[in-house]
Image (cartoon, rainbow, N blue to C red):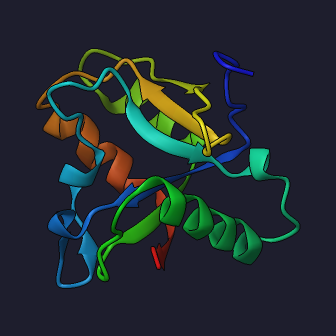
Amino acid sequence: MKGDTVPDQHHIARLCNPKHIDNGFIQATAFMLRVSEESLSVNWLEFLNCLSRKREIAELRNIYSKKFTKVGGRAQIAVLNVGEIREKVLTESPDRRNLKVLHDPEVNDPSHSGIYNLKQDDELIAEMILETVRETYPAR
């Protein structure tokens, strides 16, 4: 339900545009807010209610194909654990930032969620989030 907290033991996925990938590696810029954003767009994997990570990724690809006009060939999906992100940023950021991951469903994207309490041009926090990436997959 909109505004529900995504549990720390759950996982989220971030679609990383090819412009944030260098030599096949996701860069921290993939985890930075754009000017007009109030949260970093992610998908709540357990919300998809699939039986395996492989099926979750397939469902995300299906969602992306409907939601975006084009997903670049080099785009990647980064999978992260909510609790790891929150703990790392809380304990290692100078301002002890307390990130929130909240469910924010959209039309044709029921698992859409957001990472809140980020600031514009916050490279240090973006680096910390990058360090918690557990898995990556081709986005298409």
* Residue 103 percent across, percent down from the top left: 63, 27
Q: Position of residue 95 (x, y in %)?
A: 27, 15
> What is the x, y in percent for residue 93?
29, 27
91 horizontally vs 64: left or right: left
Q: Is residue 109 placed above or below 27 in the rendered structure?
A: above
Residue 113: quarter of image: top right
Q: In which quadrant of the rendered view does residue 25 lie? A: bottom left
> Residue at 33% across / 61% down in the picture?
16
- Residue 102 lies, in percent from the top left, at 59, 24
Front residue of 124 and 65: 65
Quadrant for the N terminus in the image: top right
Q: Is residue 51 left or right of residue 138?
A: right
* Residue 51 located left or right of residue 111: right
Q: Is residue 53 above or below residue 35?
A: below
Image point 42% across, 39% down: which residue? 41
Q: Nearer the viewer, residue 41 or 129?
A: 41
Vertical placement of residue 1 versus 89, above or below = above
Which residue: 20% across, 24% down? 36
User: How many badges with numbers are in the image?
Assistant: 0
Residue at position x 15%, y 39% from top?
123
